[in-house]
Image (cartoon, grey):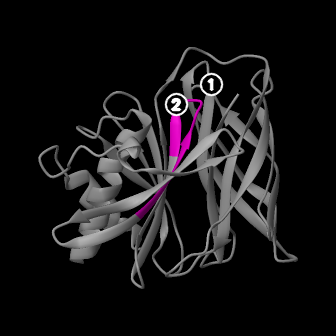
Amino acid sequence: MNKKLVLAASCLAMLAACGGSSTGGASYTTLQVFSDGTGVAKGVGSDGSQALIMAPDIALVVQAANNATQQDIASVRVSDFPVVQSLSTNANLRQGTVTSSGVVFNTTAIEDLGGEAGLILLEIPNQYSAAMATGTTLTGTPVGTHTYSGTMTMGARSVNPNQELGSFTMNANFDASSYTFSGSTSNNNLSGSGVINAQSGTFNSNNLSASTSGTSRSATMYGQLHGNAATSVSGVFHTNETSANYAGGFVGSR
């Protein structure tokens, strides 16, 4: 197994603590694999906290994350990184580095001030990049309609991604188990509707509309509900080419 993939998986697992998750006893499963081996995985902590990961060689990352133990993983939280910008989307942008076995990971974290979820971008320059949306367990049963807003990132999926920061609005109708989403960055847009599964604390869509520098694409989203009666949301998404040319993530609250 590639050593840097193992280290990256361990870094992702330890950073899951940003949303209040407990890395001990977490279980990871693969949700989607692209033609180049990159894919999406889901992690669930022993306390019910959730994480969605998008990373290269996702099968190896899932294997490494499932093999990681509390002793393998340092206790790292988003708050360990300094705030470099206060965003207009009710969030702090934090940046720093994590070093594991001599390998340095550049880390960008979006700390939603709703307090239940966060979004993490992890990179080894010129070699590896990954994203992780994470947050606390869903408690209670969300009902009625609610509007969420927050921070969205989106950009071309490449070795050294240039993820643009933007904003989103999500309207959730828990009685109808449906939602609509609209988000944008400087050069990208994402919109459409999908299905909510409040029992599992998730929401998903495979037919969103994306626009990347004027080019229209379809896209898939994986989302999570967090906090008491779903006070926060987070997730990742990708366009629907076999190798998913564009990708991003989001985090927000109501």
Please give left or right for residue 86 compared with residue 189 in the image.
left
Please give left or right for residue 50 compared with residue 250 in the image.
left
87 or 48: which is nearer to us? 87
Mark 2 lies on residue: 116
Return the x and y of residue 27 as percentages of the image width and height.
32, 44
Above or below, 219 relative to 16: below
Query: Of the residues shown, which amino acid type is indicated by label 1?
Result: Thr
Question: Which residue shows up at 76% across the image and 62% down it?
Answer: 185
Question: Which residue shows up at 35% across the image and 46% down it?
Answer: 80
Return the x and y of residue 134 as percentages of the image width and height.
47, 43
Q: Does the magenta stretch include residue 34?
A: no
Q: What secondary structure prevails in the magenta region? A: strand
Image quadrant for the C terminus?
top right
208 or 212: which is nearer to us? 212
**Circles 2 and 1: CB atoms closer than 8 Å:** yes
208 or 6: which is nearer to us? 6
Question: Which residue shows up at 54% across the image and 31% down it?
Answer: 200
Q: Give the range drawn in magenta.
A: 107-118
- Mark earlier in primary sequence (2, 1): 2
Return the x and y of residue 248 as percentages of the image width and height.
63, 62
Query: Of the residues shown, which amino acid type is indicated by label 2?
Result: Glu
Mark 1 lies on residue: 231
What secondary structure is found at the residue carrying circle 1?
A: loop
Question: Which residue shows up at 63% across the image and 78% down it?
Answer: 242
Please give left or right for residue 119 compared with residue 173 in the image.
left
Task: State the separation of the CA atoms marked 2 and 1.
Answer: 8 Å
Residue 55 appears in view: no
What secondary structure is found at the residue carrying circle 2?
A: loop
Which residue is at the far left?
A: 71
